[in-house]
Amino acid sequence: MLLSSLMLRRFCCFGAISTSPSIASSPPNPAIKKKQLIFLGSPQVSASVLDVLFNASSAPDSLFEVAAIVTQPPSGRDRGRKVMPSPVAQHALDKGFPSDLIFTPLRAGDEEFLFNLRALEPELCITAAYGNILPNKFLKIPSLGTVNIHPSLLPLYRGAAPVQRALQDGVKETGVSLAFTVRQLDAGPVIACERVQVDDQIKAPDLLDSLFARGSNLLIRELPSIFDGSARVQAQAQDDSKATLAPKITPEESWLSFDEEALVLHNKVRAFAGWPGTRARVVVFDDKTSQCNTLELKIITTRVYGGNNVPIDKIDEVIFTKGSLVFRCGRCTALEVLEVQLPGKKVINVAAFWNGLRGQKLKKL
């Protein structure tokens, strides 16, 4: 039944998509036979790429149309764990994209999904943070191949968390790559890339947004060469000997150890911002009553202490000075913490947190 619906839509009413007022504002040029493009993505950064594709496909001289969308299945999100569509699916629905052309397979190798995808006869697939491994039987379907927007300068940081791992390593330069997808992880020939300088205070979510925005523009610029086949000929093979990996982040990595240098901790806070965040345990103690208890803090914003001398006499004591909490770290360095979050509470600056201690003091655990 789904196949029949897809075929009917493909041959009789694809115009209903491209003429929807929320997706297109210009009438299509009947002289142009548009390429059928499938988009694969899931999180919010992917939705921004999809929006760029929608806008580009609506131009009178557009070479393509978005024939279908593939995304992760609905899942429990937010505090109530309400089952909701992925950000990409929700964005597409909000734009008036037909729901029967939004596929949510558990695996990209599911036979029913692949059967329906073949019926669309796509020329090109575009992936942007889809979050699912693409098997060979998927990669063989689009006649022009599959192209991925990857937020790193390949072959550096291949894998699930390239932005986070790059920030964790304290890189001064990163970028975004447009590459053909092959079975080996992020190892396909590179069509084009764009370099980006990294500010030492930028956090992962902001850098991720910036790189995918640049990647979207790079994709639109290169689509004509991808469609005419010249991109395939000119794409540069990656040097596998220079490859580095960016494995998926785990919640267990979120803990901070103040035995490490301040710069290492600062980079980790930037890298893990958003999810899973970074956490530290501190001891709150009262000199008058000798009472103490352990407190878990989520560390939101930091900077490396820039003074010549670490302003802490007692190694384990945390002090409040000039609007920051100062933690002594490894190799006689110090980390300034500017914003924190208590469990179940909102993010606050450390001045508000310090006032809430009502004269109690802090120690590293």
Image (cartoon, grey):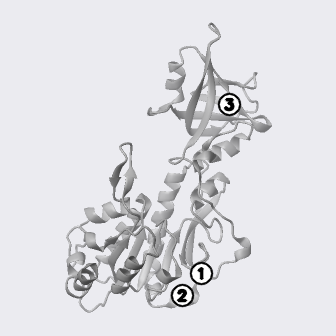
**Location of residue 227 in the rendering, given as x and y in whole percent from the top left corner:** 43, 87
Q: As drawn, is 99 to the left or to the right of 239?
A: left
User: On the image, numbered disc 3 is attached to which residue?
Assistant: 327
**Location of residue 114 in the rendering, given as x and y in whole percent from the top left corner:** 40, 80
Q: As drawn, is 256 to the left or to the right of 333?
A: left
Residue 1 visible in image: yes
Q: How many marks?
A: 3
Q: Amino acid at mark 1?
A: Pro
Secondary structure under the numbered disc 2 in the rendered image: helix
User: On the image, numbered disc 2 is attached to which residue?
Assistant: 232
Q: Residue at x 49, y 83 (%)?
A: 137
Q: Earlier in the sequence, mark 3 or mark 1?
A: 1
**Do the CB atoms of the residues marked 1 and 2 lie less than 8 Å apart?**
yes
**Do the CB atoms of the residues marked 3 and 1 lie less than 8 Å apart?**
no
Q: Residue at x 59, y 81 (%)?
A: 189
Nearest the viewer among 153 and 250 is 250
Task: Give above or below for 201 relative to 317.
Answer: below
Q: Amino acid at mark 2?
A: Arg
User: On the image, numbered disc 1 is attached to which residue?
Assistant: 189
* Residue extending furthest toward the right: 331
Alpha carbon distance from label 1 to label 2: 8 Å
Q: Amino acid at mark 3?
A: Phe
Q: Residue at x 46, y 72 (%)?
A: 127
Q: Residues within 10 Å of mark 1 (few under 14, many from 20)?
A: many
**Location of residue 217 in the rendering, given as x and y in whole percent from the top left corner:** 44, 71
